[in-house]
Amino acid sequence: MSHALTLITFIPLLAMFVVLALPDAMKPAFKWIAVAATIPQLAIALYLYEHFDTTTTAVQFAEKASWMPSYNIHYFMGIDGISISMVILTAIIMFFSVFASFGINRAEKGYYAMLLLLDTGMMGVFVSLDFFLFYIFWEVMLLPMYFLIGIWGGPRREYAAIKFFLYTLLGSVLILLAMLGLYYYGATPTFDITELAANSSHYSIGFQRVVWIALFIGFAIKIPAFPFHTWLPDAHVEAPTAISVILAGVLLKMGTYGILRVNFAVLPAATMQLAWLFLGVIGTINIVYGAMVAMAQTDYKKMIAYSSISHMGYVMLGLAAFTTAGINGAVLQMFNHGTITAMLFILVGVIYDRAHHREINGFGGLAQQMPIYTAITGFAFFAGMGLPGMSAFISEVLVLIGSWQPHPWMTVFGAATAVLTAGYLLWTFQRIYLGPLNEKYNTLPDLTFREGFTLVPLAVLVLILGVYPQAILSLLNTSLVHLNQVVLSTSGAAVAMMH
Amino acid sequence: MDLGNIASLTHFYPELIMVTGVLVIVILDLALTDKQYLGDLALITAAGSLMAIGLEAPHAGAWLFHRMLVFDSFAIYFRALIALAAVIGVWMSIGSEEVKTCDQGEYYAILLASAFAMFLMAESANLLMAYLALEFVSLTSYILTGFLRHNRRSLEAALKYLIYGGVASGTMIYGMSWIFGITGSLDFTVINRALSAPGHLPVLAVFIALVLILTGMGYKVASVPFHMWAPDVYTGAPIPITTFLAIGSKAAGFALLTRFFFPAISTLTAGGSWTALAGVDWPQLLLFICIITMTLGNLAALQQTNMKRLLAYSSIAQAGYALMGFVVLSNDGIRAMLFYLFAYYLMDAGAFLVVMIVANSTGREDIDAYRGLAWRGGIVPAIALTIFLFSLTGIPLTIGFIGKFYLFAAVIRGQFYVLAIVGILNSVVSLYYYLRPIRTMFFDQPQGDEGVVKFEPWNYGLMGVLACAIIALGLYWQPIIAFADRSLNFFVGPA
């Protein structure tokens, strides 16, 4: 398959046109078309996983064609250890979120068209290696997200949708300026990220710092890093279940992915200087602050949203460490958080579909009424806490081990927050599932087959990666170690340039 | 080459076609009792003129009519834009309910005459010619704005336009007299030579003259602080005329502005950058004007509840973006500006067209009239308007993004970092108000008092063409940028 990446990116787009072309009368077919688009995507992801060469840092499955010669813009796609896990994650999450969308019963045509466009946008971000192309996908993803939240969302959907759009657009335009800066002041004018990375020493350190911060703000809004996080709880609370799953499962990772792909690779010297503050300190704030705010929530979904902010903090902390364990742990955490948080949001959706509210204090004793549901929730909560045997344990421990030496105090805060995390998750579990059954809910049915079908495979994945993290780690290690070396090697060069 | 009156005519076909069209329409208007075909005739004329421009062979450049006009590739670009504006304006007029109540003959004759005047504006090589062309455009615009004689808003708008225009052009011709006093000529090339000649330059006098001239040209492109007429005129005029003014008149203004401020008073240096007159700091002034134009336009648009008014302020802001290409003083910037004007054409015309489609059906222009548009039969115009508005914001996959990309590229390359930051912040602010109609159309449910949008093949056709062009050119824009590139050539005569 020489065009594997093009296929994996554009199959959903093709399906979108099919959905749009079909008459409204074929409504029941739309969701199956979406399923039909995500299955080959998943298959190609598996193919990539199978055929990925873990021993090289080179770009694999590359496709390159000239697009706009006058500006040296290319249609350049390829993956390496930085992106392969994200491609796989996207394919997995998209597959399950289509099933999680089956409950949508209004304007299905628009919904599935937007969902598929979103799929193309996200996949495109992870596979493009031309900055211009990357930017196009990055922005294209905003539009369907805006409509998905705004049309199919909850009561305050308009506010949430516009807030999401404005925040992320602000980030994107900063990225646009940074991109143009890199283009014009590089060794040769190019948007090719690999080429920009190869010539990174050409940029003066002052220039690198300015561009780094612009890029960081652009990416940090997506993560979302404190203090740019306020759009996330609103967007999550209003978004329909499947969209929350995608938002937390894939979208947030784009922020940290962008930092690795551009900030780390293209601006290593500035990364070396600024990471401790912008990734380390802000990451630690994310961890602690996110957990504390999560504890204060009474809305189930908002609680999960804040826990996402907290868990993404570990990724940032790992990136700031510049150790093999730290950077590997960070990317593994991106993957693990994607699967676990997807489960959590599907679980919230299950209860919301039945009870039509998400007030944590409004339930009680659901374990008696919905035992299977409760068991899976318990599993997901333990995974969220990072219990040994679960995937998040490995990645969080790697992050903490990696960052212990360079940033001991941040690591202490990060590790201590595990207690807070356990606190808010267990407390929530107790209020919703344990105790006497709230009589209002003594008719709620347990999990349906469809819901189980979306949850169980994710749970299996969490378990597998809990005992055999090598399945993902082996993909990442070579590229990440190399990237880490590149950044570390600038510490001498940067000092020399400053004098 | 300096061509005489008869020899010039060979490079004057597009204009001649327009004039012929005007005369034929006036005569037929007297002769015919059934006037419904006059619009078609006007459309044929405008399209013929556009085709004549397309068929124009590449040419090194020449002066026409004894150095009154100049014929060069820069002029061809703007002639193409203006003819396109005429085509769009006439096409929309034929599909407009408002225009059906007007006197067809006069309406189309004046519309084409206005396009003819804009041609002249884009080609002027002499300050006197520039003034006359600008006045010609203004006079026809006043009449077109006030064409809905029984509508108070339309009349009020025309009157405001007239008063503002009178003041602005009076100020401009006063400034031109200063230039004449300083250089002894009205001819752009001679002015350039006189100003750049070694020796003492009366810096303050030149600066005052430029500010005065800028009043008149700034009024045509509706830049702050000469923009006050625009919202009222755009709101009061019939929608096709609003569109025609918003795109055509603005393009003509940009053509004149560029031709005066670049080849006439600046010098092109190696590497494609322009040097302004030593000591005369008009670039700083224009930088300031550019920044407040986009900021004020965007901030004012936030408050609007009428779609035409919202788009009016938005088009002020858009002029501000285009000015970014102007103030960086480089060929890169001018090329970006040319490209952006074309992009602006498609998206602004499209947005106004959807406003007209909705107004045709519901008779309303306020944003509330768009409530739930997508859910009451208007899904196609709703999607089209979304494309136009996203393009105006500068979201990728649209030509608007590519336009902004080129502008910001020129700004970054010229190291105008503050301008770049202001520009992107403005883009974010503009998103907020561009999203308002989108939100209303898609997120709100219809309440039943908005009326159903009816399908009009004539208008939907143009809308489809514009929307598809925006997406297609957003993916592959090479032909347009190549055209803009070729047009970066001002004829200034032998050195």
Image: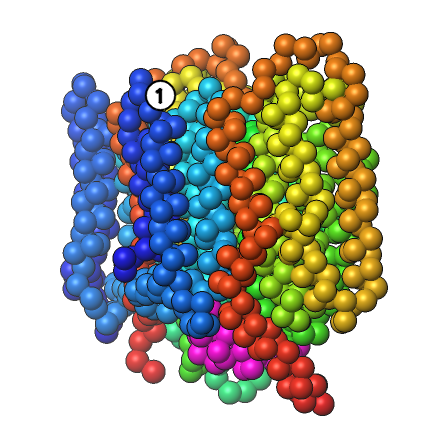
Vertical side of A207 occupied by A449: above or below: above
Residue on which the image places disc 1: A27
Q: Position of residue A491 (x, y in %)?
A: 67, 82
Q: Please name the amino acid that badge 1 sits on.
A: Lys
Query: In which quarter of the view is residue A425 placed?
Result: top right
> Any magenta on residue B314?
no
What subunit carries mark 1? A
Q: Which residues are magenta?
A: A185-208
In the picture provided, is A214 more to the left or to the right than B64?
A: right
Q: Position of residue B280 (x, y in %)?
A: 59, 73
Regarding residue B200, the answer to whether it shows in the image is yes
Name the residue rendered at 62%, 54% in the picture: A333
In the picture provided, is A312 more to the left or to the right than B347?
A: right
Vertical side of B449 occupied by A81: above or below: below
Q: Position of residue A35 (x, y in %)?
A: 38, 34
| Along the line of sight, the residue nearer the viewer: B204 or B316 | B316
| Along the line of sight, the residue nearer the viewer: A29 or B319 | A29
Query: In which quarter of the view is residue B178 placed?
Result: bottom right
Tell me the crowding category of disc 1: few under 14, some 14 to 19, or many 20 or more residues within 10 angstroms, Cα based.
Answer: some
